[in-house]
Amino acid sequence: QSALTQPASVSGSPGQSITISCTGTSTDVGGYNFVSWYQQHPGTAPKLMIYDVSNRPSGVSNRFSGSKSGNTASLTISGLQAGDEADYYCTSKTSSSLYVFGTGTKVTVL
Amino acid sequence: QVQLVESGGGLVKPGGSLRLSCTASGFTFSDYYMSWIRQAPGKGLDWVSSITTSGSTIYHADSVKGRFTISRDNAKHSLFLQMNSLRAEDTAVYYCARGGYSHFDKWGQGTLVTVSS
C-alpha cells in the first residue's frame, strides 16, 4: 500500500488561506468517507483536526475545514496564524491494509 | 480527561523482541477500537496495528504481519504490542491511539523503540 500523496510544503502569510491536498486512489480516499487530518508540532503527538472528510472534533477551530472530490481530499486553513505552523498528515481507510497515511506537509507561516 | 501512557520502549538488537504497553484512563476503554501508529526519526506517520473493542479482530500492516501482535486487556484498561524479529527499520516512536474504525481521536506521547546492534 503506497502512502497518500501530499505536497511537501505549503506556506502562507498570516490571515491568508491555504489548502493541503491528499491524493490517493479509488481503493482508499475515493472509496471511503473515512479521511482524517492530523496536526503535529515538533516533538509532540499528532492531534486530530478533521475526521470523516469534513467533521471537526470539539475544540478544533472552525478555521480548519475538510473536503473531498474523487480520489483527492483537502484540508483548508483559513485566517492563517503563527500557531498553525506544523506538519499535517492525512489518512484514509483502505481496502488492502486497514489504514494508509499521507506523506505529510510542512506548513510555514511567513 | 483522556490519557494514554505508553511504556516498554528501549534499545534492542536486530532479531530481538519487545513488548509495548499502553495504559488508558479517563474513558470507557472497552468501548473503543485501539491502535498503534509509529513514526521513524524525521519521517511521517505509519499505521501499524488496530484491534476491535472486544479484541476478537486484529489488523496489522503488511510490514509487520507475522512479527507483531496487538492485544488488549479491557479489565486492566491496557493495550499491548508484542514485537518479535525486530529490524532496524522498526526503529521509531510508537504511539498508542484511541480509535481505528474511522480515525484516531486521542494519542499518547509515544515510546521510542531503537533497533540497533
Image: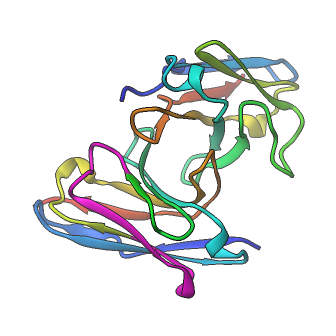
Q: Position of residue B40 (x, y in %)?
A: 36, 47
Residue A21's quadrant in the figure?
Answer: top right
Residue B27's quadrant in the figure?
Answer: bottom right
Quadrant of the image containing the N terminus of chain A: top left
* Front residue of A14 and B30: B30
* Front residue of B48 and A85: B48
Q: Is residue A36 left or right of residue B70?
A: right
Quadrant of the image containing the C terminus of chain A: top right
Residue at the (41%, 70%) spot, across then down: B71
**Can you say whether A51 is above or below B20 in the image?**
above
* Front residue of B52 and A91: B52
Q: Is residue B86 left or right of residue B62?
A: left
Q: Is residue B45 left or right of residue B25?
A: left
Q: Position of residue A39 (x, y in %)?
A: 65, 41
Please say whether residue B90 is one of the residues in the magenta stretch: no
**Can you say whether B42 is above or below B58 in the image?**
above
Residue at the (67%, 30%) spot, across then down: A33
Q: Coloured how?
A: rainbow
Q: Position of residue B74 (x, y in %)?
A: 55, 80
Q: Position of residue A106 (x, y in %)?
A: 58, 29
Residue at the (28%, 60%) spot, across then down: B68
Which stretch did the figure color magenta?
Answer: B60-80
Furthest residue in direction bottom, as rendered: B75
**Can you say whether A48 is above or below A3 in the image?**
below
Please say whether residue B61 is one of the residues in the magenta stretch: yes
